[in-house]
Amino acid sequence: MGAISELFSLSPQAGEAGNRKAMFFKKTEGNLLQCELCFRRCLIPEGQRGFCRVRENRKGELQNLVYGRPVGLQIDPIELEPMYHMVPGHKNLCIYTASCNFRCKHCQNWSISQSAPEQIRALKFTPKEIVEETLKQGCQSISHSINEPTVFFEMMYEVARMAKEKGLLTLCHTNGGIARAPMIELLKFLDGVTVDLKSFSPKFYQDISEAKLEPVLETLKTIRESGKHLEIVNLIIPTLNDKMDDIRKMCRWIVQHLGKETPIHFTRFSPQYKMTHLPYTPIKTLEEAMEMAKSEGMKYVYVGNVVGHPANSTYCPKCGKKVIERTHFILLKNQVKNGLCPFCKEKIPGVWSVA
């Protein structure tokens, strides 16, 4: 299991992007519609689309063009999200569509996220069919990832709602640019969220992602307020966001606003898209970031995209013993029992069962 082709073959139909009335928009003067799904709040004229390329004003109604049109469905270990504190080793079905509401120059999935719906082959799966396929394939969870799931909000919302009715865990991996109201609505049907905190520099967000930092911080606080499980990813890019002073500030903010038990993944950059001129992140830099986070009190700090690194695994912050052993995204041994360290009974935060 795990190959994309396994699920492609289940529904080989390709076609133009679907459409469905969007959630979270309002009519303004003239023929303009204001999308209220993400921080951009695009004003969209008749026949035009928002910044995300997938929400279009059609005769005074905002349409989502990728509803029921995932680009792919794939089965992976849940660790690939990454989500390390949720049912370790379980099979997860991931869905994704075209496009994104950011323009990250370093995007690792740029061929999908930087394509408009009509530029990339799409499948035909209704939310109900996605949930049914998840159960058929023996997966315990569904995640919305790869591209930015905010752009397929309506499909994600329906999939998550139906999945919860069937007893599945539901996840979302987001850039955090979603607006507060839709995030609150979506959290009703989510068990966990992974957020990319790309940098703690507003300038980085503006120059590298054509986005803003503040909405991401607000999203992080909204998730924490909900009580749902939260993990953070910080992809460290040489020369762009690898200054330890900035990483220290970021970690202090996380401890203050989200809590020191929030897992953080410092992941290795690989040259992609418009940043092929930059080198891979030195492992030493990732380790320095890890030690910085620990020095600020963070209890669960991981190094990602480095196969076999000791910081792929989870250690009890009280007794220091290894409680979950991993190599990269592969689970080797899970000793957490009922959310507790088996050695000293320290509580390990997370979601440890499907029920």
Image: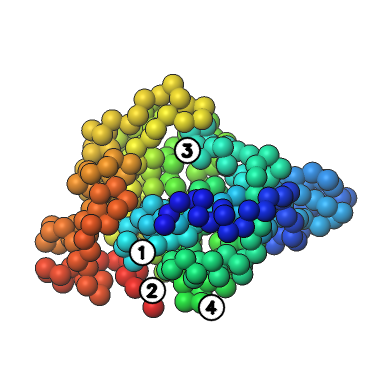
Indicate the secondary structure of the residue bearing disc 4: helix
Answer few, some or many: residues within 10 Å of disc 3's Cα (few below 14, many 20 plus, some between 14 and 19): some
Residue wearing tag 3? 108
What color scheme is it? Answer: rainbow
Q: CA distance from mark 3 to mark 1?
A: 24 Å
Answer few, some or many: residues within 10 Å of disc 2's Cα (few below 14, many 20 plus, some between 14 and 19): few
The first of marks 2 and 3 along the sequence is 3
Q: CA distance from mark 2 to mark 1?
A: 10 Å
Q: Label 3 is placed on what type of residue?
A: Gln
- Residue 165, numbered label: 4
Q: Label 4 is placed on what type of residue?
A: Glu
The first of marks 2 and 4 along the sequence is 4
Question: Is 250 or 341 nearer to us in this picture?
Answer: 341
Are the residues flagged by discs 2 and 1 in contact, CB closer than 8 Å?
yes
The first of marks 4 and 3 along the sequence is 3
Which residue occupies 69% across, 62% down?
23
Answer few, some or many: residues within 10 Å of disc 4's Cα (few below 14, many 20 plus, some between 14 and 19): few
Which residue occupies 88% across, 50% down?
30
Which residue occupies 47% across, 76% down?
167
Please provide percent x and percent y for residue 300.
26, 55
Indicate the secondary structure of the residue bearing disc 3: loop
Residue wearing tag 1? 90
Are the residues flagged by discs 4 and 1 in contact, CB closer than 8 Å?
no
